[in-house]
Image (cartoon, coloured by chain):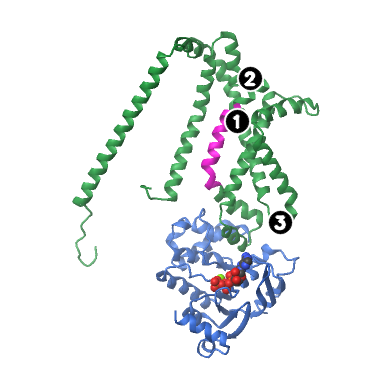
Amino acid sequence: MTDGVPRVSWAPSDLEIARQHHRRKASGRSVLIALVSTLVFTAVVVVVLINSPGWESVKTTFFDFEVAKDSFPAVLEGLWLNIRVLFFATIGVAIVGTLLAVMRSLRGPVFFPLRALATIYTDLFRGVPVLIVLFLVGFGVPALDIVPRVPAAVWGTVAITLCYSAYIAEVLRAGMEAVHPSQRIAARSLGLSHAETLRVVVIPQGLRKVIPALMNDFVSMQKDVGLISVLGAVDAVRAAQIEVAVSYNFTPYVVAALLFVAMSFPVIRLTDHVSARMARREQSGGTV
Amino acid sequence: MSVLTLSNVWKRFGDVEVLKGVDLTLEEHDVVVLIGASGSGKSTLLRTINLIEQVDDGQVILSGDDITDPRVNVDKARARIGVVFQQFNLFPHMKVIDNVTLAARRVHKWPADKARDKGVALLEKFGLGDKVDEYSDRLSGGQQQRVAIVRAIMTDPELLLLDEITSALDPMLVGEVLDLVRDLKEGGSTMLIATHEMSFASTVADRIVFMHGGRILETGTPEKIFSAPERPETQEFLARIMHR
Ligand SMILES: Nc1ncnc2c1ncn2[C@@H]1O[C@H](COP(=O)(O)OP(=O)(O)OP(=O)(O)O)[C@@H](O)[C@H]1O
Ligand SMILES: [Mg+2]
């Protein structure tokens, strides 16, 4: 624009055109290889399945369309209970998990009891199988006879919250520790209190670093809410079990499984998307 | 009343004595530059003033208030002092304007629009008007450091502490940051600056303080320190740093 120098807009050189051509050809080849290998793999699995001696009986006991259709409404209604449990457990986990993470990150001898309590809690609940926590909470606490009677699903929600809070607390703590100490110093130098520094500077940055890990835990929680069926709550798994008992056919379990997959699918895809986007943001080199 | 008085400040890390009885006074509008070899305790001194390190003995008195008194609210004391670090330490998850106004909003409880107005005005004054709503990690080093300075002066602190604010920058970007510091001096800021940039020190300082082994060995005007240093340690330090 200046000095009358003619500005030619950029056009790819022959070299660049050749490179682009080569890349297109190479990527076309990869797609083809992927496609063929997928088809071959699927064909092998199908052939092996269909030719296996028990295939006919498996087909009728697990994949009976009529049974699936009949059991679907009951299983779906059960899933609604799972979704509600998931909703409240997620809120519970967000609160308790954050509290535990903050407690574990407190510094100074004054906070030793809190820190120790949180450490013992997370160590304990990360080690005990969810199923056992469910039994202990779902059957043990009501047996104490100090709390009013509530539906089994409530105890299920409590047990899931107890377990997953411990997992989430560890993930959050890792995220908070990954925030460089200079960030805390900068915030404290501005006069922010310890709590404000955590809330405004450390937690937001730490959270960002562990979002994919948190979403993974959420996905596994989505399927673990199916475990509350052991307490007798009529959720999707329990509903399927009842249907199985009626029809002497296992198809309702497959229905329940598909519904759980359908429920978790959006979050799984979202997790991939978010991870990919974060990876792009952190580092723009597309070839490594 | 002096803005800052240090009297007999001691600081130990384990068995290592890093500050061994430092006395220093800054009057209003004073610009004092700390020089000295690496490890002589300049950063540690600045950190004790800002209460990031607790003194082992002695006092730090800010405009008459002994801020090393354990009854003092350290957050309130820190809010009266602006600090800029070597590595800028902006908050990467916040926009430039939110970095700059954070303390005004959270600590000084300014209304949001007052904070924003002043933040934008300062950023514009220092040539960062087009970066107001940018995320801070998208800026060049020199721009980040200028934002960090704006963040430190946003609430008109009584004292500014600058710790080697140009040593993480490309030589090309040093000038723009140092020009800003000269502007602050024109504006009457009281500053305590640690630096290895001797030419900058000589132009901006009212007084140069030479630190050696955790003590202040020599103090004087830039002319005196650079052309007629008295102590052999000062002479040796200057000889080394000038002939690098
Ligand atoms: N947190 C700490 N723990 C232990 N020793 C420390 C700590 N901080 C500083 N030191 C020691 O204190 C001494 C002074 O360090 P300081 O950072 O104050 O020096 P400086 O004058 O700022 O040096 P430079 O010019 O390299 O920045 C050094 O020997 C350093 O190793
Ligand atoms: Mg230093």
Disc on the earlier residue, 1 or 3: 1
Disc 3 marks which residue? A108
Residue to which mark 1 is pinned: A86
Residue at the image position 58 percent from the left and 81 percent from the top: B209
Q: Is residue A91 magenta?
A: no
**Ligand 2 placement by image quarter:** bottom right
Tell me what hue chain A is rendered in: green
Image location of residue B222, percent across then percent down: 53, 85
Q: Amino acid under label 3?
A: Gly
Highlighted magenta segment, given as a residue range: A207-225
Label 1, label 3: how far apart the Cα atoms are: 36 Å
Chain B painted colour: blue
Q: Secondary structure at mark 1?
A: helix
Q: Could you say which is closer to the camera, residue A206 or residue B65?
A: A206
User: In the rendered view, does A93 fall on the left or right side of A37?
Assistant: right
What residue does disc 2 label?
A234
Please provide percent x and percent y for residue B155: 59, 66
Do the residues bearing badges 1 and 3 touch, measured as CB atoms within 8 Å?
no
Q: Which image quarter is the N terminus of chain A in?
A: bottom left
Q: Nearer the viewer, residue A262 or B233?
A: B233
